[in-house]
Image: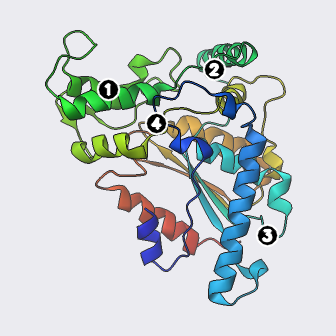
Amino acid sequence: MAIYYAQRKYSVYILDRRETNIPPDEDDFSFMEYWTVEEHLNDTYIAINASRSHTSFLSKKPAENIEVTAIGHSHEALILTAYEASQYDDMPLGSVDRIVPVDIIIKYDPQYPELIYNQTQEFNIISSEIENEVYEGTGMASMIYVASMAYSNPEGSSPYPGLTNIQLFRLMASQTYILSSYPYTPDYHYWSGDLSGLSYVNESRLLYLTLSGGAAPFTPKYMDQFMAGLMGNVDGYEINSSSVDSPVLYVGLGGGFGDYGSWWYENEAGNTNSRVTSMIWNNQGHASLLIDQNSPELWALIDNWIKNTET
């Protein structure tokens, strides 16, 4: 994706979150104690500041004249939206001119009380874990473990009765909601497919990327708490929609958060910002922005929006 935009003459910078390089076998998470959402916002400011300054140096244009479009996927879309509503976006070198949050839910439409309730329960569980200094790996930690078995012994018997290792990996990828106590949507999944294979992504490449750092096994608890607090309508957890004043393109992935995610951008941020646009792209799953064979079709749609949207 970064190469795609670089080839189209953008100056491209990648910001990866702190937890990306935590090894799957880590069992001491004391170093993550202060990895709050505020720290992630500060990281984002440092990165945007650096990217604007570096692009200014390369182009010989004043830094304040460099336009920044930020694309964030999943948790990064959450951070990006919170960043746009924060004081960091008001700083001259930290401002963002356009944002493209991809597949996230900031707040559910009130017509889905069961999904809201589920995230309230999730919030309570995470809050209790933080209070009791307990940390358990996310679903990605389990997926990395299963991917390692599927890569080394695909036809071997998996821990899930009746399935081979590769079939279990496909189940986790294509029917993710089955394995979650509180799925975000009724059909939430990472990639489309079934037990016989995945539809839009090269399976061997996906396994390799999962095992070589493409999946972060652990998420800071404060990030999970913040997300569940937003979606569960918990008091004290909200993003000020009226502060989201840049042009916004929300992209929902049909098999991921989809229309559930577009509601807040259209109905909350859109109340005070006439430059909010949303689109739902294909029913392929939450991770389809990245390495599906047809992902460049989505990158092209985002590129077209950037070029046709004035700041």
Q: Compute the Cα span from label 3 to label 2.
A: 36 Å
Residue 283 in view in this figure: no
Q: Please say if 115 is above or below 70.
A: above
Q: CB atoms at circles 3 and 2 under 8 Å apart?
A: no
Disc assigned to residue 256: 4
Q: Quadrant of residue 178?
A: top left
Q: For the residue marked with disc 2, what is the amino acid?
A: Gln
Q: Which residue is mark 2?
A: 119
For mark 2, give the secondary structure. helix
Looking at marks 3 and 2 on the same chain, the residue that comes earlier in the sequence is marked by 3
Q: Which one is closest to the eye, mark 1 or mark 4?
A: 1
Q: For the residue marked with disc 3, what is the amino acid?
A: Leu
For mark 4, give the secondary structure. loop
Disc assigned to residue 146: 1
Q: Compute the Cα span from label 2 to label 4.
A: 16 Å
Q: CB atoms at circles 1 and 2 under 8 Å apart?
A: no
Q: Please say if 219 is above or below 291.
A: above
Q: Residues within 10 Å of mark 4 (few under 14, many from 20)?
A: many
Name the residue at the top extreme: 161
Q: Please say if 163 is above or below 244.
A: above
Q: Which residue is mark 3?
A: 93
Q: Please say if 214 is above or below 176.
A: below
Q: For the residue marked with disc 4, what is the amino acid?
A: Gly
Looking at marks 2 and 4 on the same chain, the residue that comes earlier in the sequence is marked by 2
